[in-house]
Amino acid sequence: MVFAVLPLFITAGLGAPALAVGLVEGIADGSSAVVKLWSGWYSDRIAWRKRLAVGGYGTTVFGLALLVAVNAWPQVIVARALAWMGRGLRQPIRSAMLAGSVGRRDLGKAFGFHEALDTAGALIGPALAFLLLAVGGDFRTVFWVALIPGVLCVVLFAAITRDPRHETSPPVSLRIPLPGGFWRLMAPVAVFGVGNFATAFFTLRAAQIMQPELGRTAALAAAVGFYLAHNAVGAAVSFPAGWLADRVGKAPILAAAYLTFAVACVVGVVGHGWPALGLLALLVGAQNPVVSSVEGSLTSSLVEARRLGTAFGFLNGINGAADLASSVVAGALWTFASPQAAFGFGAALCAAAALVLWMRQPKTV
């Protein structure tokens, strides 16, 4: 709910430029990256990692709750960064718990199913946000209502999830280095991350490509509709993509998802009107959860179970640092050059990442 309207809240609600969106997204991702590196490393060394993840979920909800009191866009940086630091705290632990809960032959399905449910939540949330705005609510109404599922999430994760490790067992010695195949994967992950700017920029572009056919208010509603539609696509393709990755190979599916983002950027450069909006929703929705789930399942197949927290810390940390760079660069290009320059930048790097991954596929264990 929050992220469907946040870029519009920053620009239309607070009167900030697109550069502010890039700074908000980039600083949040950068702060999250630092926490992910520590959280993943530390979680492999403690027996109570689930409690640490619960604290991460609670920190995210608290950070997003601060948005209801924001009246200037620099304050959004604080709230968003705090929320994403909580995400950084929980994400490597949650991924390691998920990977340890299934056999290696089912990793693609498991991560694809998780991403499908996660994206389904991101489908319901924007739908509620769209309805709230359509009936006369404002952005802060959306932020207030979003606290309800946020609090439920903390309670449910604390109450019903189980860590597949024995929480009373002492952690094992972790002096074994991460394998070379994992580091080979990190190279295209980093290149793609630098080009893979936040979906917020597609939301802003969606509002632009629907004008002047639609008025400003209707174009903003169409942008929220784009966010809703791209999550619907993601929820539909996540599990089948994970199933396919288990059978034909995770690296080829991941390379195809990287290339899909590059094509979406090209549509963002040249597209206009309803056909372009629909194609953007299809392409952005198809790649986003697939990238996340297949990167996770491929990492799990490259690293032994006792190092998964550390591995996911590096994976998410590299992604977060790259996202910091991509969002700031995209925001600067958008503000000081043009939206087309920002999307061209993303297309070039993401196509390069797809090529590198396809030509240098890591070997799974």
Image: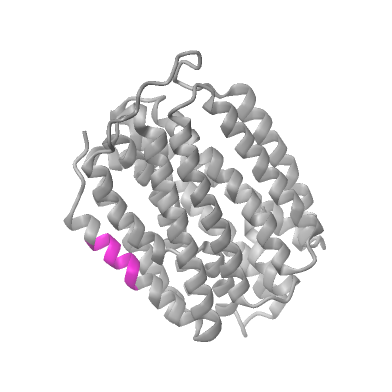
Name the residue located 63 percent from the left edge and 59 percent from the top edge.
Answer: 4
Q: Position of residue 200 (x, y in %)?
A: 56, 65
Q: Is residue 353 magenta?
A: yes
Q: Is residue 282 magenta?
A: no
Nearest the camera: 315 or 108?
315
Is any part of residue 2 visible from this angle?
yes
Name the residue located 63 percent from the left edge and 69 percent from the top edge.
Answer: 222
Q: Position of residue 339 (x, y in %)?
A: 50, 80
Is any part of residue 9 visible from this angle?
no
Determine whether, in the image, residue 337 is placed left or right of residue 353.
Answer: right
- Quadrant containing the C terminus is top left
Q: Quadrant of residue 69?
A: bottom right
Q: Range of the magenta residues?
A: 348-355
Name the residue located 24 percent from the left edge and 39 percent from the top edge.
Answer: 179
Colouring scheme applied when the structure was drawn: one colour
On screen, residue 4 above or below 157 = below
Considering the whole magenta stretch, tell me its main secondary structure. Answer: helix
Nearest the camera: 31 or 332?
31
Determine whether, in the image, residue 139 is placed left or right of residue 268.
Answer: right
Residue at the farthest top position: 168
Q: Position of residue 267 (x, y in %)?
A: 42, 74
Name the residue located 81 percent from the left edge and 60 percent from the top edge.
Answer: 137
Determine whether, in the image, residue 240 is placed left or right of residue 335.
Answer: left
Q: Quadrant of residue 238?
A: top left
